[in-house]
Amino acid sequence: MRAAPTILHLDMDAFFAAAEQASKPSLRGKPVVVGGLGPRGVVSTASYEARRFGVRSAMPMAQARRLCPNAAYLVPRFQLYRTVSEQVMELLGRLSPLVEPLSLDEAFVDLEAGGVAFESAGARAAGERLRRDIRAVTGLSGSVGLAGSKMLAKIASEEAKPDGLVLIEPGTERRLLAPMSVRILPGVGPATGEHLRRAGMTTVSDLVEAGEDELVRLLGKSHGASLHRMATGYDDRPVVAERDAKSVSVEDTFDVDLHDRLRITMEVGRLADRCVQRLRASGHSGRTIVLKVRRYDFSTLTRSETLRGPTDDPGVVREAAARLLEAVDTTGGVRLLGVGVSGLADFTQEDLFAQAAGEQAVEEPVGPVGPTGPSGPVGEEAAPVAEAEPQPPEDPAQRRWLAGHDVRHAEYGPGWVQGSGVGRVTVRFETPTAKGPGRVRTFRVDDPGLEPAEPLPLVEPADTEGGDEGGAGAEPEGLAEAQDSPLASRPKSRSEGGGPGSGAAMSRP
């Protein structure tokens, strides 16, 4: 345990929803809910305005709509969130070489390692400066906790929400923790919390009074001893700059249970391709392929296969996932599918036998081809012919516009999808730096002037240089103060991607 509060924990405030509000002037100060919009969608993030109605993360979207029917319901724009996250993490990296990201919007920082602070006053000054810099660079707010340990720094940032800073002085840990719920401690989830409640322990002080022996008897040696140390305020975990990924996975929950075996197989192949894309983006390969299937009755099956060596070949992962699917009974329907890769490595050991077989398959002659395609029945021999044919251009009438995604119109400029359905799409034309809400227009879904677009930066570069236009929610005073810090001088980058995906979505204005 440190004698000074030099471990910082940053948690961005309602990150996804706040980014949407900053991007869309018409939604500022109004309830916004981000998540899956289908019948089985769940809430990813709710703005503080929506939380007043009882909406919270991980809540079924249908329940959220009942609690807050007038909120704006949007699908996530991860390209934008990743861009903003990179800006925030760069600011943290300028504070210290020891930055431990926990997610896109959350991280620990060791201020001592960066030589930024060695005592309370310096730590507080660094935390306040960081909050100003984040506001100037991204237009968003973050809450900062400072303490002598990671556990207490995280608790402090929770107490600081929203848009605040809390510093816990070393020596005050036990007095602070005593009245808090046991659920505030790391490792105490719903099941453990209920187990402790039945034993008469609901606050942290109850755990301290019970003693280590009693907690070990209730929870086991490792968990019980660790929980007792946490309850007494002791946490010596260091800030770790590099956290090795253990697995990479993707999964989809379907609005309607899948029954057709061919459709299920196709979805598994699609998930395998997405998983490999994520695997390659992280610079890894893996040996163990994992298939996850949640059936109609909510029973979940997991199957895995370990290869002879690590791979990042999409064909190998697809074939392994398909083999695993063959051993799963999907009778009755499937509501969720997932594909993952574990046993990660930073190199690829090519499967020479599979490579040789693939080369041999390419050399085999293809059957005769008629004017309109293969002369025989469609089968494996027809695949090379199909790949050689040019892909037809996208049919604008088949486009589906997701609520919240970015678009650009040839006449009206940039905007975002407010809702779509029955062959129409409604767009609100506004930019993050606009002074007020933009105008709304409705088009046919196949309007030739309407195209998907990349997200616009939340704060224009001129804003950090003292321009006239303020960023989303940024106070002129805060921007002026932020210019005293070198952290606020970096240029902004435009996010990549961000066009709408597949599936219709509806949203209230």
Image: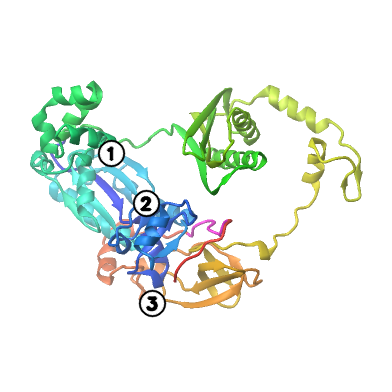
| Location of mark 2 (residue) | 59
Q: Main secondary structure of the magenta part?
A: loop
| Vertical arrangement, residue 368 with respect to residue 349, above or below | below
Q: Depth-wise, is mark 3 or mark 2 nearer the camera?
A: 2
Q: CA distance from mark 3 to mark 1?
A: 45 Å
Q: Earlier in the sequence, mark 2 or mark 1?
A: 2
Q: Which mark is residue 473?
A: none
Question: In the rendered structure, which amino acid carries the disc numbered 3?
Answer: Lys
Amino acid at dot 1: Pro
Q: Nearer the viewer, residue 504 or 362?
A: 504
Residue 13 placement: quadrant: bottom left
Whole-percent x, y for residue 508 in the image: 45, 69
Q: Secondary structure at mark 1?
A: helix
Asked if the residue at tag 1 contacts the one at tag 2, i.e. Cβ–Cβ closer than 8 Å, the answer is no
First in sequence: mark 3 vs mark 2:
2
- Marks 2 and 1, how far apart at CA: 15 Å
Query: Which quarter of the image is occupied by the C terminus?
Result: bottom left
At numbered mark 2, what does the secondary structure look like: helix, strand or loop? Answer: loop
Which residue position holds label 1? 190
- Give the vertical position of 201 relative to 30 (above or below): above
Query: Local crowd at mark 1 within 10 Å, few (<14), some, or many (≥20)?
Result: few
What is the magenta range?
494-501
Which x, y percent locates residue 169? 11, 44
